[in-house]
Amino acid sequence: MDEAETDLVNVPVPRRHLVKVYGFIAELEASANGQQRGSEPLGDPTDVWTDELIRQAFEESNPAVRAILKYLAQRPGDPVPTGELVELLKQHGYKPARPDTLSGVIGAFGRRVTTRYGLKGSRGNAILPFQNPRDRKLDSRVYIMSKRIAEVVMSL
């Protein structure tokens, strides 16, 4: 990389858009490195999520996280848009339920995944029992659970 590619510049950003701008920059950096944001060399979360860990995480989760896991498990391999999971949170009493509410619920779950179960990638990010890539057509994240993890979740 030459100096122009690594120079940093200050860009004023409205505070309400700061997280989105950080996310966009992370996606640009990840695509420049040939990987999706949040992806790890391990790839599919089924590489690290054992049946016992899935059971433990499910049993120790609050009702909202359990509902999200069951909802994804009912649709193995299918990308579930953020909006569907936000609606699910509304059904579980989250008011207001917005995309940032979902981010908070998933974020708290992710912190437990890294601290209690030790499932973190090389950059310290949680390896969740589902993938959550960005869908450019929807301009949103989608959530995808593998068939193997879904089978375990559905048995609970």
Image (tube, rainbow, N blue to C red):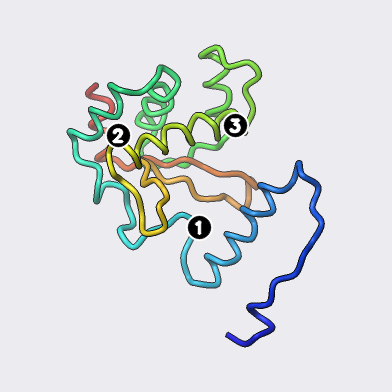
Residue 70 coordinates in the image, percent (x, y): 37, 25
Q: Are marks 1 and 2 in contact (CB under 8 Å)?
A: no
Please give the residue where the numbered disc 2 appears in the rendered image. Answer: 150
Q: How far apart are marks 1 and 2 (CA)?
A: 23 Å
- The quarter of the rendered structure image containing the C terminus is top left
In the image, is residue 139 above or below residue 67? Answer: below
Q: Where is residue 139 in the image (x, y as percent from the top left)?
A: 65, 47
Towards the viewer: 141 or 138: 141
- Mark 3 belongs to which amino acid? Gly
Q: Which residue lies furthest to the bottom in this view?
A: 2
Q: Residue at x 47, y 40 (%)?
A: 143
**Which is closer to the viewer, label 1 or label 2?**
1
| Kind of residue at badge 1 | Arg
| Residue situated in front as seen by the camera: 91 or 42 | 42
Decide which of tag 1 and tag 2 comes sooner along the chain.
1
In-image side of 37 versus 49 (left or right):
right
Q: Residue at x 32, y 43 (%)?
A: 146
Q: Whole-Å distance between the Cαs marked 3 and 1?
A: 20 Å
Q: Name the residue under label 3.
A: 83
The location of residue 15, given as percent across then percent down, is: 77, 44
Q: If you read the primary sequence from the N terminus, does the residue marked by circle 3 or circle 1 appear first? A: 1
Local crowd size for mark 3, using a 10 Å CA cut-off: few (<14), some (14–19), many (≥20): some
Residue identified by numbered label 1: 37
